[in-house]
Amino acid sequence: MISWVGKGFIGLGLGSIIFAIVSLGLSLSRKNGIWEKRAKTSLKIAVFFHSAALLLLLVAFITNQYQLKYVAQHSSTALPFYLKLSAIWAGQEGSLLLWAFLQVLFANLVFRPTRHADDKPIITWAGFFLALVAGFFSAMTLFLSNPFVVASPIPADGFGMNPLLRHPGMI
């Protein structure tokens, strides 16, 4: 169940990003503000879905959901809370999800209100390219390196975090 919901969140986030990329492309080619508004809304929806996926992964770590392969590989019952929090980015799958979330967040921040009308085309282009990067990271997370893959067989306890990542500087 948690696997399907997590994959769904990432997939819906990727769909929102793709819609934002197309909308921003139409906004740039047609000089139409309505497409930019749709892209802004779509990017906000993508932030919501990526935030939900990250929160779901955090809940999976806190509640020891070892049916997820990623949680079983990077956590254990004896791991303290602060290490379970940092275990989200302890492997490739979680790091890509975190980067996808950050890229969508940065794409949203580009569209914050500005006082200069001269900056509008530059802001739209910046949002377009940031949305492309966010789409790349989301697609990589969904199709190649998904943290919500089910483990088979399900272990009784996780393998724990890499000892090198337990250092406070790595957290």
Image (cartoon, rainbow, N blue to C red):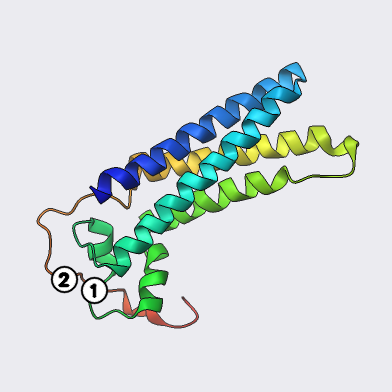
> Looking at the image, which residue is at 48% across and 52% down?
51
Element under label 2? loop
**Relative vertical location of residue 36 with respect to residue 45 in this rendering, above or below:** above
Where on the picture, by quarter, is residue 90? Answer: bottom left
In depth, the one of 170 and 98 nearer the eye is 98
- Say whether residue 133 is left or right of residue 154: right
Q: Report, in whole angstroms, how far the alpha carbon at label 1 lies from the one at label 2.
A: 6 Å
> Looking at the image, which residue is at 23% across and 47% down?
1
Mark carried by residue 76: 1
> Looking at the image, which residue is at 77% across and 20% down?
31
- Say whether residue 66 is left or right of residue 17: left
| Residue that lies at the very extreme toward the left in this rendered image | 153
Residue 61 image point, x, y percent: 31, 66
Where on the picture, by quarter, is residue 91? Answer: bottom left
**Relative vertical location of residue 55 with respect to residue 22 in this rendering, above or below:** below
Where on the picture, by quarter, is residue 76? Answer: bottom left
Amino acid type at image mark 2: Asp
Residues at marks 1 and 2 touching, judged by CB atoms closer than 8 Å: yes
- Say whether residue 163 is left or right of residue 137: left
Amino acid type at image mark 1: Ser
> Looking at the image, which residue is at 74% across and 16% down?
30
Is residue 8 visible from the viewing direction of this image?
A: yes
Is residue 96 visible from the viewing direction of this image?
A: no
What residue does disc 2 label?
157
Residue 104 image point, x, y percent: 57, 46
Mark carried by residue 143: none
Residue 131 image point, x, y percent: 59, 38
Element under label 1? loop
